[in-house]
Amino acid sequence: MLMLCKLIQPKRFTDFLRLTGYGTYNQIHKRSGLFVIQKFDLLLFFQFILAGSTFLSLYQKEQGTVSEIPLSVIYFYILILLVYFPLKRLLELGTGRWLKIEHQMSAFVFQKMNSLHFFGLWLLLINMLTVYSFGPRIWMVYFTLFLGVIILFLGFVTTFFRFRFLIRRQWLLFILYICAFEIAPLAVLWKFVNNVL
């Protein structure tokens, strides 16, 4: 999928790999419409889904829950991630349309998804190291999670500074957004995964 991304848009792929030019990338390559999904973004999203589900499966193996990773577990994680992220994105875009800030919300969601896609590249690297070199290790899990927090935090800070004037005017809506669309879905997802497994 990464090779396809590079073949489809080599310049954009190179821009995407530069974490320092993160804000610039989001400005240049933002979508033209509210619900428009580009092939480049779709391929990166599927790469993130596969890398994330593989990482979760390797984590489960490291915890000793399973001795071997059955394909059904990987499919289960793929299904959860495939439902969770698009549904969350549609809810956010729908709320933006309802509050009449659809273009700002579309740009905001685009930047957040780019943070996840970038984290997906690191997950791919960690998965390769885990499978072909070190084997599942708890320190790699913690290192990956720490790296993910840093990447997502940088994406959040970039997004926050880009929309700081809108947030200042409507800070109550921003706090409600954080509670309703960031904290609550993660809590529900965590409880669902723990109950099923």
Image (cartoon, grey):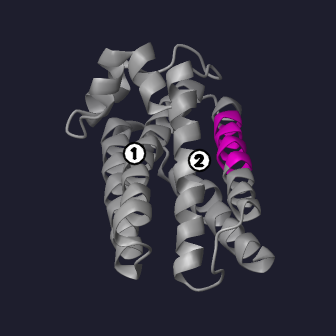
Q: Amino acid at mark 2?
A: Ile
Q: Is 153 left, or right, of 176 in this rendering?
A: left
In the image, what residue type sits under mark 1?
Leu
Disc number at residue 121?
A: 1
Of the pair 92 and 150, the residue shown nearer to us: 150
Residue beneath disc 2 = 49
The C terminus - image quarter: bottom right
Q: Is residue 142 above or below residue 114?
A: below
Mark 1: few/some/many CA within 10 Å (<14, 14-19, 20+): some
Residue 181 lies left or right of residue 175; in this view the side is right
Name of the residue lying farthest toward the right: 196
At 57% across and 77% down in the image, what residue appears?
A: 61
Whether residue 194 is visible, yes or no, is: yes
Q: Position of residue 16 (x, y in %)?
A: 33, 31
- Secondary structure, mark 2, is helix
Q: Earlier in the sequence, mark 1 or mark 2?
A: 2
Label number found at residue 140: none
Which residue is located at x 58 percent, y 29 percent? 42
Q: Main secondary structure of the magenta part?
A: helix
Please provide the residue range marked out in magenta.
82-95
92 magenta-colored: yes
In front of the other: 81 or 36:
81
Q: Residue furthest bottom?
A: 64
Instruction: Quadrant for residue 21, please give it.
Output: top left
Q: Residue at x 40, y 67 (%)?
A: 145
Q: Residues within 10 Å of mark 2 (few under 14, many from 20)?
A: many
How far is mark 1 from mark 2, CA to CA?
Answer: 11 Å
Picture coordinates of residue 67, whole percent (x, y): 63, 80
Relative to 164, say whether 52 is above or below: below
Q: Name the spot of residue 176 as percent of width and height, x first.
A: 59, 57
Tag 1 secondary structure = helix
Taking the spot 36% from the left edge, 46% from the top edge, the residue there is 155
